[in-house]
Amino acid sequence: MKKTLAHFRTWFKFMILAILAAFFIVGAISFFYKPVYSVTLGDEIIGYSENKSALQEKINQYIEKGNGQNVAFVEIAELPEYQLCFSKKDIVTNDEEIFNKVIGQGTTYYKYYAITLNGEEKYYVATFEEAEKVISDLKEKNSSNKEQLGTIEKYEMELKDFTTVETCVASLYEKPVVKTTTTKKSSGGSSAGIYATGSNATTAKVNIGISFIRPTSGVLTSRYGRRWGRGHAGIDIGAAKGTAIKAAASGTVTYSQYGYNGGYGNYLIITHGNGVQTVYGHCNTLIAKTGQKVSQGQTIATVGNTGNSTGNHLHFEVRVNGVTQNPLNYVSY
Ligand SMILES: [Zn+2]
């Protein structure tokens, strides 16, 4: 009986010691070491993570849904492996770096939108809303190519440069059709042949909210409207070569070019706002340059006989949203 008791005491002491030792070891380990996951991709350890589930979740989210911007999804060749290990406490964990390495070895597919004209991709925008806005703006402006426009949802490995909605609209906009053709007049006279055809040439007065002054002194030699079975897109004012041509109203010169220019010769266009433009054709010299702001009455060019013209005169047009108007509704000669 005594022997058994002594044996038990020895065993008890040993147990106490063993438990203390265990506590000490665990304490020492947890003081110097901590559990982390080593992350392996291929054969290479790419880092250590303390929070395996959060890292996995982040990677999976990215693979499935991208970054919510233009990355649509990512095709990953290989997913990383995680292994629990105890590491010294001062080990550097690098979840961010692991994440970047994992998604970096994948193929990223970008999602964006193309604006098409006749099926050809013209511009790229980031979102569906922007693509819709481009199309609806151009429809609202009654762009003549509105039926040829479209959008395509793109999934590509390469991200394109995006264009702003404003630039897309400005670049794709085409004025509603006003066909201008030219005809040589067989006998002399000062009128040139710039004609509008179709139903776009109107004679009813449109209120433009701008008052014009006479663009040049001279004599009215041809009226607006039908002439020899075709429409004349403006009025002709006969004047001596070199007579000053003045801006009918303030605005910005949006076109100023020498050349034949489809019969207009050296001509310029001033854009006034409210969709209103004035056109000055057959000039001898162009004084105002494209992009220049001009004030009403400022000399912008001189009268000439360039393009399809048989005498020195100014061909003057008024356009509202691209449709020619009768200039005599706004200036008197
Ligand atoms: Zn004319």
Image (cartoon, rainbow, N blue to C red):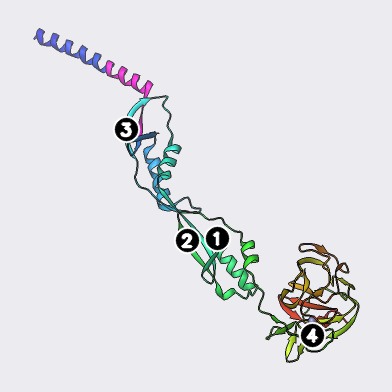
Q: Are marks 2 and 1 in contact (CB under 8 Å)?
A: yes
Marking on residue 307: none
Q: Are marks 1 and 3 in contact (CB under 8 Å)?
A: no
Residue 166's x, y, as percent? 64, 62
Q: Residue at x 53, y 56 (%)?
A: 160
Marking on residue 224: 4
Alpha carbon separation for disc pair 2 and 4: 49 Å
Residue bearing mark 3: 84
Q: Which residues are magenta?
A: 21-38
Amino acid carrying label 4: it is Tyr
Q: Earlier in the sequence, mark 4 or mark 3?
A: 3
Q: Nearer the viewer, mark 1 or mark 3?
A: 1
Marking on residue 124: 1
- Residue 32 vertical placement versus 297 (above, below): above
Viewer-side residue, 64 vs 200:
200
Which quarter of the picture shows residue 180?
bottom right
Viewer-side residue, 324 vs 329:
324
